[in-house]
Image: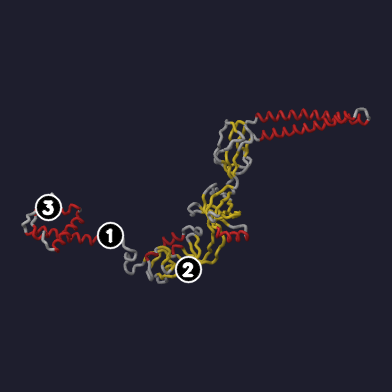
Amino acid sequence: MNFKSPCDYHDRHSSFHFFWRGKFRWVRFCRQIIYACLRYRFGRQAARVDNYPYRTLSAFRRVGLITIVLVACIFQSCKAPATSGAPSGRASRGAGLPASVAIAPAKKGDIRVFVTGIGSVAPLSTVTVRSLVDGKLMSVNFEEGRSVAKGSLLAIIDPRPFEAQLMQAAGQLQRDSALLTNARLDLQRYDTLWAQDAIARQQYDTQKSLVAQLEGTVRIDQGLVENAKLQLGYTRITSPIDGRVGLKSVDPGNIVHTTDANGLAVITQLRPIAAVFSIPEDNLPRVLEKFAATKNLAVEAYNRSDSVKLAEGRLSAVDNRIDSSTGTVRLKAVFSNTDNKLFPDQFVNIHLLLDVKHDQIIVAQAAVQRGPQGTYVYRVQPDHTVTVVLVTAGLAEGDNISIDAGLSEGDSVVIDGADKLREGSLVESNAAAAHGNASSPHGKKR
């Protein structure tokens, strides 16, 4: 059954009905407030009077009960916002209680000026090991992924066919050498006879030509012997460079050919190794000026997140053109890579050192705050209160930043907890937080 109010369950001739269904505006207004509060406090079924045990009470008692419920709902609604949520930093502190912050002194030091770029690691040499002769692969003499030295044996191809060719060429050379020796002896005899005018000139010239012909034949045979030796040497495949060998492409027992595209394996040189990176073209004049003055510009390589230094090296070359599509120029740096932290095709962040600023006032970057009035810091006074000091921020390097104006060496500044402070706030040093900020790793100019 549909109903509009709790009065539908009672006698319409009662005084409560007359009061409840009154035509006065203030009665209707109060009735709507009661219904809204009941629904807010107890849900959508709050207005259903059959859900409550008070339906057996008198009309005036019900009015009193509803009034009590209304007052309780209003009290609960007003109380909840006051107790919910965390208090603000300033409201949570009692009057006169110091705020716990991290404090560190401003120091003098050096700030390095970097030009940054992104790039990838590139080996100085990459060799695909291929067979120079066709034949059966007898053995593979390297371990995949291991370092190999220049000249170390990598694989052996069946040498027997090439040994036979060498033997054949050597026999032919020996035969032709014997013929040449005999022809030279005959030529000596013909010289004597020709001097005595005992033979015709034609016979003497023919013997002389025969000696020259046999000399040519012997030289051909010598070339065949050398070629056979060379082919036999190609059956032993050795590493042409120092580096790391990759995964093998062919297993023993297969027939390899000189035209195989993949070869036997790939060797990359890791020590030293290079990195090719790009910098904006606007920085090129400064780099060229420094590179011309000294060929020893320091370069640092960092990981993908630019948080861990991997290696230190030197700038080796600058490209001869600017990429017009990106507005960058490519540079090449070389690293010794003795600890093998750099790997071919690895993504790196490169920092090229251009200059070093000496005797700078340095503070932690966390100490510098920014507001409508500009950059400022909270300087701690001798009475353990703080004052706002406007500063001029300079170069940044890692977690540190130089201050060009506003601070002096030895000034104590707040480096953690500045969000709880204002001019004149009382503070106390949090040694643990200060130590944590002081021991944070130093990075590069971002």
- Indicate left or right for 314 with 195 as reference: left
Characterize the local packing of mark 2: few (<14), some (14-19) or many (20 or more) Cα atoms within 10 angstroms: some
| Percent of width and height locating residue 272 | 59, 49
* Relative to 144, residue 38 above or below: below
Q: Secondary structure at mark 2?
A: strand
Marker disc for residue 84: 1
| Percent of width and height locating residue 10 | 8, 54
Q: Secondary structure at mark 1?
A: loop
- Dividing the picture into quadrants, the one containing residue 316 is bottom right
- Dividing the picture into quadrants, the one containing residue 328 is bottom right
> Of residues 323 and 171, which is closer to you in this image?
323
Residue at 52%, 48% in the rendered image = 346
CA distance separating discs 1 and 2: 41 Å
Q: Secondary structure at mark 3?
A: helix
- Indicate left or right for 87 with 252 as reference: left
- Residue corresponding to mark 2: 392
Q: Which residue is the extreme one toward the left?
A: 13
Q: Which residue is the extreme one toward the right?
A: 196
Marker disc for residue 53: 3
Give the label, 1 or 2, closer to the camera.
2
Inspect the image, locate mark 1, and give the three-letter code of the amino acid beneath it. Answer: Ser
> Of residues 444 and 318, which is closer to you in this image?
318
